[in-house]
Amino acid sequence: MEILLPLLTGYLFGSILTAELVSRLSTGQSVFSIGTGNPGMANVMAVIGKKEGFLVLAGDILKTGAALAAVWLLFLRGRLSPSSGWPLLEEPALLAGLGVLLGHNWPAWHRFHGGKGVTVTCAWLILALPGWGTAACLAGGAVTLLTGYLPLGAVLIGALGALAGFAAAGPRTGLFFTAAALIMLSRHIHGLKRIAAGTEPRHFRKR
């Protein structure tokens, strides 16, 4: 139960798809029926508008932070980590972060079809490892802007996040973020294949 409850708490928060809420309120349509069908910021921003895209971004960050805060209060009793002084590196909080990612990517209410987890992963990384996590996300963002390929930046964020976990917080944290990196790779593997084939669309760059 010490493992299941924090994981389930994170999963429930993660399965609240902000993009679906924003799309329904803005257009009356499900986000799964517009654009690429992906319930994420990029799809909403491209099809509905920038303001709505930023609302999705804010919502995904908020739900990640809320899940970690809930677990900190419920399972860690609001205490600091005795080893690092940072409670979000304690196992219940790490389980909650993984749960948010699983819930966002595979929500039970939508037949386990969800998003790709880029914003959620970034939010979790930055909250758990503020310095290293921010650096990993900035590096991934820079690669996306330079190449125009979202999958490349996303996979790089996951890989650098895993390395940051090992380097900054040890094997346990590293393994959690390795799991996140593998999830990120699984969600973007088709995009990487399209890049190799020359059929992946570029973003943020003039062709």
Image (tube, grey):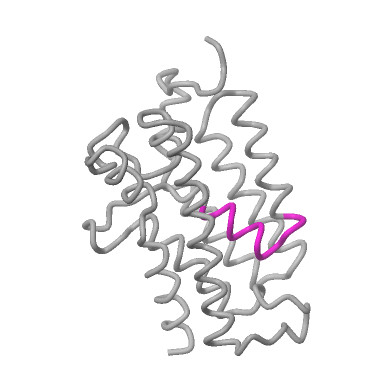
User: 89 above or below 57?
Assistant: below
Which residue occupies the foreground of this view, 48 or 14? 48
Residue visible at 42% across and 82% down?
4
**Point 28% across, 52% down: residue:** 113
Q: Is residue 72 above or below residue 56?
A: below
- Residue 130 colored magenta? yes
Classify residue 172 by image quadrant: bottom right
At 39% from the left and 57% from the top, the residue drawn is 104
Q: Is residue 36 above or below residue 205?
A: below
Q: How many marks?
A: 0
Residue 108 x %, y %:
26, 64
Magenta region, residue range: 120-132
Q: Is residue 44 left or right of residue 59?
A: left
Q: Is residue 207 left or right of residue 81?
A: left
Our reading of the magenta stretch's main secondary structure is: helix
The x and y percentages for residue 20 are 31, 48
Q: Is residue 41 above or below residue 184?
A: above
The spot of residue 63 in percent (x, y) is 48, 62
Instruction: Residue 89: say if magenta.
Output: no
State the quadrant of the N terminus. Answer: bottom left
Residue situated in front as seen by the camera: 39 or 180? 39
Question: Residue 95 location, x and y as percent?
Answer: 52, 74
Q: Quadrant of residue 171?
A: bottom right
